[in-house]
Image: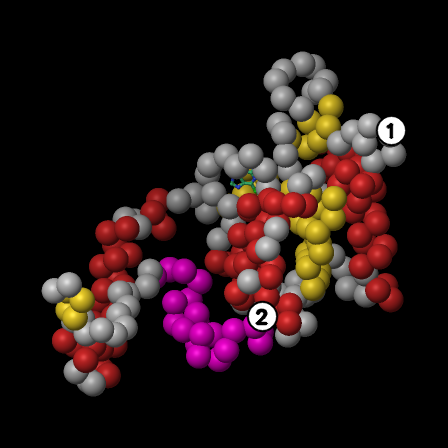
């Protein structure tokens, strides 16, 4: 999968692509991620990326020209041989709430272009011109879309076939699309500061272990995600 990240703050991505699952996915050539500085696509002397809102009000608005120039350049240079179509995603708190189902959908897309917002928002003509999918990672306000883009890339990359080993993939399946929280896990030592690993996990009785884990999952889901699945608007 190709991923292009368009941002005013490329430095915010620092080392995230060089560690853990993202590093492995890149080494396996299953993820090809590039970060682009929108400011490099300005044409005025001051390299202006934002301006005051028409009609007044606080804050600054991201200008339309640098974003569209950057997107055009990315599409022209990264889509080789008239290849696959790119999915353009705008990261904004007004977007559709990102979840595991969406992560799975996006993991099947060959090319993602993620545009990170900053300031008070985007000039509306960015939306009109690109007709992007708009995503939010939750109901709180981040100072920009960069942290959200990192979250989306992580969640999506681990679902690309071949990125995780088969053991982890099967585990993922058994908690299909996040409708159940994880059961408690333990590793050695069997006792630590008086806290013991539950006997059932050391019993060797696989049916009992499966039943215990299922019960713990259900209880944890009940107490930590009380009914939210049924209350939420579609
Ligand atoms: Cl995608 N952007 C910003 N600025 N804030 C957010 C967000 C995105 N998702 C949740 N909060």
Q: Is residue 197 left or right of residue 93?
A: left
Q: How far apart are the alpha carbons under marks 1 and 2?
A: 41 Å
Task: Name the residue at 19% across, 80% down.
Answer: 202
Q: Residue at x 25, y 54 (%)?
A: 222
Determine which quarter of the picture holds residue 60: top right
At numbered mark 2, what does the secondary structure look like: helix, strand or loop?
helix
Q: Mark on residue 119?
A: none
Q: Nearer the viewer, residue 168 or 34?
A: 34
Percent position (x, y) of residue 24? Answer: 58, 70
Q: For mark 2, what is the residue?
A: 24
Which residue is more in the foreground, 11 or 112? Answer: 11
Query: Callout 1: few (<14), some (14-19), or many (20+) C-alpha neighbours within 10 Å?
Result: few
* Mark 1 or 2, nearer chain start: 2
Q: Is residue 7 rendered to the left or right of residue 152?
A: right
Q: Residue at x 46, y 47 (%)?
A: 234
Task: Please tell me in which quadrant of the rendered image residue 195 appears.
Answer: bottom left
Residue 115 seen anywhere in this rendered image of the structure: no
Ligand 1, seen in the image, is in the quarter at: top right
Say left or right for 185 vs 84.
Answer: left
| Main SS class of the magenta portion in the image | helix
- State which region is magenta: 161-180
For residue 168: magenta? yes
Q: Which residue is mark 1?
A: 45
Residue behind label 1 places its C-beta within 8 angstroms of ligand 1:
no
């Amino acid at each position: 999968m190709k991923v292009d990240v368009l941002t005013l703050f490329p430095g915010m991505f620092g080392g995230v692509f060089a560690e853990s699952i993202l590093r492995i996915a890149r080494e396996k050539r299953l993820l090809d991620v590039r970060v682009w500085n929108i400011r490099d696509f300005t044409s005025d002397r001051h390299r202006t990326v934002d301006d005051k809102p028409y009609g007044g009000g606080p804050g600054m608005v991201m200008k339309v020209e640098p974003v569209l120039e950057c997107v055009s350049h990315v599409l022209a240079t990264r889509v080789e041989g008239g290849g696959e179509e790119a999915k353009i995603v705008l990261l904004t708190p007004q977007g559709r709430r990102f979840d595991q189902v969406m992560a799975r959908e996006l993991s099947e897309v060959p090319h993602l272009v993620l545009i990170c917002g900053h300031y008070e928002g985007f000039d509306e003509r960015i939306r009109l011109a690109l007709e992007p999918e708009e995503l939010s990672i939750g109901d709180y306000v981040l100072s920009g879309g960069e942290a959200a883009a990192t979250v989306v890339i992580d969640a999506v990359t681990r679902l690309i076939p071949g990125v995780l080993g088969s053991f982890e993939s099967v585990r993922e399946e058994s908690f299909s699309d996040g409708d159940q929280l994880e059961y408690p896990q333990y590793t050695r030592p069997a006792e630590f500061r008086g806290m013991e690993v539950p006997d059932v996990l050391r019993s060797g009785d696989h049916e009992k272990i499966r039943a215990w884990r299922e019960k713990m999952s259900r209880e944890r889901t009940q107490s930590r995600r009380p009914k939210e699945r049924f209350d939420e608007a579609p």
